[in-house]
């Protein structure tokens, strides 16, 4: 599908507006959604031995995990320290997958992070009608 420059600009504006108007819970679910997508794309690229594309996806996934880590406030809730440990481990897996050109760490990261995405999606759906919670996310 060929997009005109106007269509591309409109899509970019829509995506930007979606992010700017999202609640903290929606932002977390957006990040997790893109994280899982990146990992699936990286896995597919690794299967094809397309290391440039795999690397790009893995680096973007690392950036998302870094963002989730930076937004995390482990001092605010009981599970924060454990989640930070998961993010740290996932980052190590993504670096290994990229440096070693190894699909197994990518798959392990996906197996580790996809259930978190599902949990955040469920939590966001449950809270969609509730008043905003405290200012901590992820």
Image (cartoon, rainbow, N blue to C red):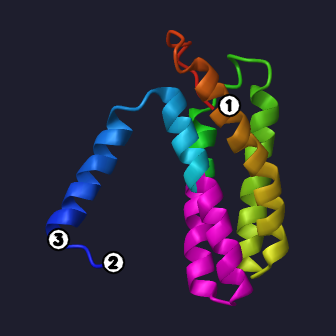
Q: In terms of depth relative to the viewer, which is nearer, 123 or 42?
A: 123
Q: What number is the disc on residue 1? A: 2
Q: Residue 105, percent across and down?
A: 82, 68
Quadrant in the rendering for residue 68:
top right
| Secondary structure that dominates the magenta span | helix
Question: Measuring 38% from the left and 40% from the top, which residue is drawn there?
Answer: 19
Q: In terms of depth relative to the viewer, which is nearer, 81 or 61?
A: 61
Q: Is residue 108 above or below residue 64?
A: below
Q: Is residue 70 above or below residue 9?
A: above
Question: Measuring 67% from the left and 64% from the top, which residue is drawn there?
Answer: 39
Say whether disc 3 or disc 1 marks the residue closer to the N-terminus.
Answer: 3
Residue on which the image places disc 3: 5
Mark 1: secondary structure: helix
Residue on which the image places disc 1: 122
Q: Residue 7, percent across and down?
A: 20, 64
Q: Residue 86, percent across and down?
A: 79, 44
- How far is the residue under mark 1 from the one under mark 2? 33 Å
Instruction: Categorize mark 3 by other alpha carbons within 10 Å: few (<14), some (14-19), many (20+).
Output: few
Say whether disc 1 or disc 2 marks the residue closer to the N-terminus.
Answer: 2
Q: Which residues are magenta?
A: 35-64
Q: In terms of depth relative to the viewer, which is nearer, 30 or 136?
A: 30
Image quadrant containing the N terminus: bottom left
Q: Residue furthest front?
A: 1
Evaluate whether residue 88 shows in this view.
Answer: no
């Amino acid at each position: 599908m060929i997009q005109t420059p106007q269509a591309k600009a409109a899509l970019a504006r829509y995506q930007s507006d979606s992010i700017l108007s999202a609640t903290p819970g929606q932002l977390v679910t957006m990040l997790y959604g893109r994280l899982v997508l990146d990992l699936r794309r990286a896995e597919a690229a690794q299967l094809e031995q397309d290391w440039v594309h795999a690397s790009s996806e893995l680096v973007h996934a690392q950036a998302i995990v870094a963002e989730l880590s930076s937004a995390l406030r482990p001092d605010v809730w009981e599970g924060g320290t454990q989640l930070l440990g998961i993010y740290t481990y996932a980052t190590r897996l993504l670096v290994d997958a990229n440096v070693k050109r190894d699909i197994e760490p990518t798959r392990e990261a996906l197996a580790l992070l996809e259930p978190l995405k599902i949990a955040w999606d469920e939590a966001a759906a449950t809270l969609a009608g509730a008043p905003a919670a405290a200012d901590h996310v992820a």
